[in-house]
């Protein structure tokens, strides 16, 4: 047997003894070797996860925008009546209806009427601005045409005419102009689309009695708006804007000076 053959078994036994004394060397090498391919395999998944999370924010934004478009807008006005405009049926005459609008929001709100029959219908006022909690009566005028072919008109039936009421949030002090709704189309809310219903003017009904009360209240509101504003300061006279109180004091002062001048001369 050669010398090399005798030394080889001893070398193998030494290696085994070393592994027994320090087993973590073997574990470390095995774990690193086993973890290296798994780590390389995990990298693509991380990249894929990042790529999946990046468009999620944009998709969330698109979902929220779609939700805003689907969900109904918050209403700013309370309408009475809320769904229909009632008119007394009188063929060949101009009849009236009334509706009450109240601003239930916490901001100033502009409102505007639109109709599908502008030739036979109009509103007074056609629009305006309401402060929070403020209300207004609007009067709607409509010309009732004669039925075609002398057919009897069916009462309590919906007419083809429609009225749309829109609202828009505005700043305090802003005056109403129709162009406001064209300039801020994205902020306009359609409050309600009202249909027209004719009532029998000769037959008493709860709807007809309510209509008469609202017309009286609307007329009273119009007359109240026509009254001059109450005077908060001194009364003004003539085009020269002379205040009565100042004028009286001035005349008394001049009269007193004349008396004093006469007394001194005598």
Image: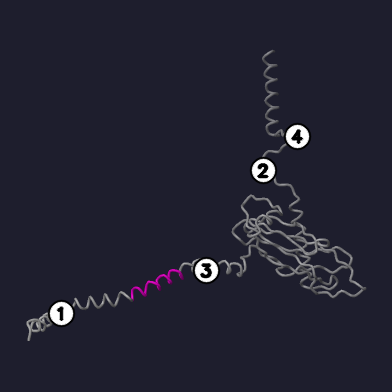
Distance (Cα) linking label 3 and label 4: 68 Å
Name the residue at 60% across, 57% down: 107
CB within 8 Å, label 1 to label 2: no
Q: Is residue 23 on the magenta stretch?
A: no
Residue for badge 2: 232
For mark 1, does the 10 Å Cα neighbourhood hold few (<14), some (14 to 19), or many (20 or more) residues? few
Q: Please give left or right for residue 2 compared with residue 182 in the image.
A: left
The spot of residue 253 in percent (x, y) is: 67, 25
Up-down relation of residue 113 to residue 39 (above or below):
above
The spot of residue 82 in percent (x, y) is: 70, 68
Residue for badge 3: 59
Label 3 vs 4, first from the N-terminus: 3
For mark 4, does the 10 Å Cα neighbourhood hold few (<14), some (14 to 19), or many (20 or more) residues? few
CB within 8 Å, label 2 to label 4: no
Distance (Cα) linking label 1 and label 3: 56 Å
Q: Secondary structure at mark 2?
A: loop
Distance (Cα) linking label 2 and label 3: 60 Å
């Amino acid at each position: 047997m050669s010398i090399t053959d005798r030394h080889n078994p001893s070398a193998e036994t030494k290696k085994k003894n070393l592994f027994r004394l320090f087993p973590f060397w073997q574990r470390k090498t095995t774990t690193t070797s086993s973890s290296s391919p798994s780590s390389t395999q995990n990298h693509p998944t991380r990249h894929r996860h990042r790529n999946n999370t990046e468009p999620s924010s944009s998709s969330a934004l698109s979902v929220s925008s779609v939700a805003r478009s689907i969900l109904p807008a918050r209403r700013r006005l309370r309408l009475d009546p809320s769904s229909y405009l009632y008119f007394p049926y009188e063929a060949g005459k101009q009849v009236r209806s009334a509706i009450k609008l109240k601003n239930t929001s916490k901001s100033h709100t502009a409102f505007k009427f639109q109709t599908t029959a502008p030739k036979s219908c109009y509103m007074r006022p056609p629009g305006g601005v309401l402060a929070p909690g403020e209300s207004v009566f609007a009067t709607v005028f409509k010309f009732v045409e004669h039925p075609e072919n002398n057919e009897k008109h069916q009462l309590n039936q919906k007419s083809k005419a429609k009225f749309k009421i829109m609202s828009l949030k505005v700043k305090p002090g802003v005056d109403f102009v129709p162009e406001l709704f064209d300039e801020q189309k994205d902020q306009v809310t359609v409050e309600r689309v009202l249909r027209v219903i004719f009532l029998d003017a000769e037959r008493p009904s709860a709807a007809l009695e309510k209509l008469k009360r609202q017309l009286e209240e609307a007329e009273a509101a119009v007359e109240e708006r026509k009254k001059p504003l109450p005077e908060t300061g001194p009364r003004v006279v003539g085009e020269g804007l002379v205040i009565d109180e100042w004028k009286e004091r001035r005349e008394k002062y001049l009269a007193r000076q004349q008396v004093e001048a006469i007394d001194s001369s005598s």
